[in-house]
Image (cartoon, rainbow, N blue to C red):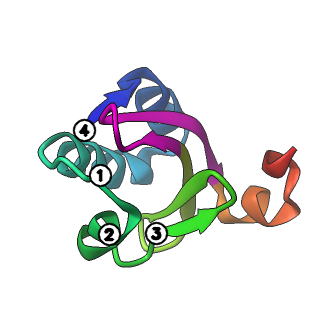
Amino acid sequence: MRVITNRRLLEFSATHHDASGSLQAWRKAMESTGFSSFAELREVFRSVDKVGELHVFNIAGNKYRLITFLHFDRQLCYIKQILTHTEYDKGAWKK
């Protein structure tokens, strides 16, 4: 699956240094696997949740949340936002 775009991961990591390794590990796992469904995605990422049309990944031991939009048929993963757990809990990302 192709991740669009690594730049967002790098930008977030520039201010949250402890997220860098986890975000890049997530990206490598996504790009090395072709997922055809949420069930297959869940086999690799046990903590992923589906919220409406979005998929939310726990990053760095649930310290951060990576919000994505996945096109299984096109094998594309769009990164919508990366948030701290506190920012995520405020819920503004749902709008």
Label 2 with label 1: CB-CB less than 8 Å: yes
Residue behind mark 1? 26
Q: Nearer the viewer, mark 1 or mark 3?
A: 3
Mark 4 or 1, nearer chain start: 4
Real-space CA distance between mark 3 and mark 2, rounded to the nearest whole angstrom: 6 Å
Please rate how many residues cluster around mark 3, counting C-alpha atoms within 10 Å: few if below 14, some from 14 to 19, many from 20: some
N-terminal-most mark, 4 or 2? 4
Badge 3 vs badge 2, beta-carbon distance below 8 Å: yes
Cα separation, mark 1 vs mark 3, equals 11 Å
Q: Any mark on residue 88, and which?
A: none
Q: Quadrant of the N terminus?
A: top left
**Residue 62, image x, y percentages:** 51, 72
Query: In the rendered structure, which disc, 2 or 1, sits on the residue that comes first in sequence?
Result: 1
Closer to the chain start, of discs 4 and 3, is 4
Q: Is residue 1 left or right of residue 42?
A: left
Which residue in the protein does label 3 denote? 48
- Where are the magenta residues, as a range? 69-83
Q: Is residue 21 above or below residue 88?
A: above
Q: Which mark is residue 1?
A: 4
Q: Secondary structure at mark 3?
A: loop
Of badges 2 and 1, the one in the foreground is 2
Query: In which quarter of the view is residue 17 placed?
Result: top left
Distance in Å between CA atoms under marks 4 and 2: 14 Å
